[in-house]
Amino acid sequence: MKNFRFSALGFACMMLLSLVLVACSNETGTEDEGKIKATSTIGMIGDVVSNIGGEHVESTSLMKPGIDPHLYKATQGDIGKLEDADIIFYNGLHLEGQMIDIFEQMGKNKPTVAVTKNVSTDVLLAGDGETTEHDPHLWFNVQYWIKTAEVIRDELIKLDEENKVDYEKNAEEYIAKLEELDRYVKEQIATIPEENRVLVTAHDAFGYFGYAYGIEVMGLQGISTQSEVGSKDVSELRNFLVENKIKAVFVESSVPKNTIEAVIEGAKQMGHDVLIGGELFSDAMGDEGTEEGTYLGMVRHNVDTIVEALK
């Protein structure tokens, strides 16, 4: 009889434990239930989606820190994330050149949005003519990036009008931070003596930055990293550094350093020392969980690095 009572008690405990586990499992499973699944290509877009979507949106970015979007090819896992998404955000202007066909196919079944679509072609800078008609790196002009935030806000409202008030409130607060960032960039770049305002980088990603904030920009490689770097490019940039007594150049987190190092070595052989002024984030943000892993933090890092080296 004792054994029977023990077995019955044990069975009851097991059933109770099972019910608790099921309840916990359901609670975990429903944590994201009802949220809009938004998949973005680059981290800069995904970060804006997270800020504006808030608690109503599950934001995922395909390309991680250090990844070059110009050369990126979608994996099978990426295709799954895109198929599973309720809405897809991408930069456009041929930044994700290897994924254009995928966007066209996905666009037949769900909102697939180029966040740069509302930026007038009148203000777009020319591309390199080979791989892109226009320069796609709009995030380096903070005012242009505000326009992409407005696009993301409006597209989320179209998809989820029930939470319109929250999206508008989140967007208003985030755009205010972007306006503050724009002022910060202007103030900091203005502290660099005019003759020192020359930004030399591994590839030509900072055109909008230079145009907006009054700094001359030169890149060893073209606007797209698909373009080839030849010995002529290296020698021309080397000569520019020597002739203009440029003291610092910058490497980028998503671009190999070997070509810019060849320029530095060439200048040294001509009797002119050039330092690496620091690492900038161009086509990808920093690690998740860091300041540089956000758009606001990435831009501030770049500006502070540039000013420290050139000032």
Image (cartoon, rainbow, N blue to C red):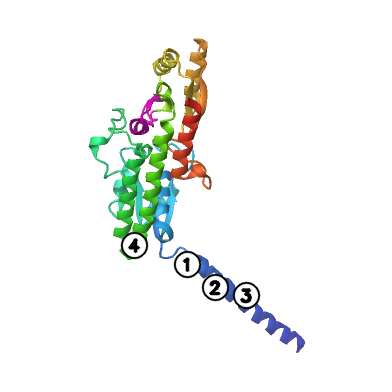
* Whole-number angstrom distance, CA of label 4 to CA of label 1: 23 Å
Q: Which residue is mark 1?
A: 30
**Horizontally, is 65 left or right of 82 in the view?**
right
Magenta-colored stretch includes residue 171? no
Which residue is found at the position 50% from the left and 13% from the top?
272
Q: Position of residue 302 (x, y in %)?
A: 46, 35
- Residue position for label 4: 165
| Magenta segment boundaries in residue numbering | 204-228
Label whose residue precedes the other's in the sequence (4 or 1): 1
Residue 23, which numbered label?
2
Label 3 or label 4, whichever comes before in sequence order: 3
Name the image quarter holding residue 230: top left
Few, some or many residues within 10 Å of mark 3 (<14, 14–19, 20+): few
Question: Of the residues shown, which amino acid type is indicated by label 4?
Answer: Val
Instruction: Assess whether mark 3 and mark 2 are in contact (beta carbons under 8 angstroms).
Output: no
What whole-number distance in Å separates the C-alpha atoms at marks 2 and 1? 11 Å
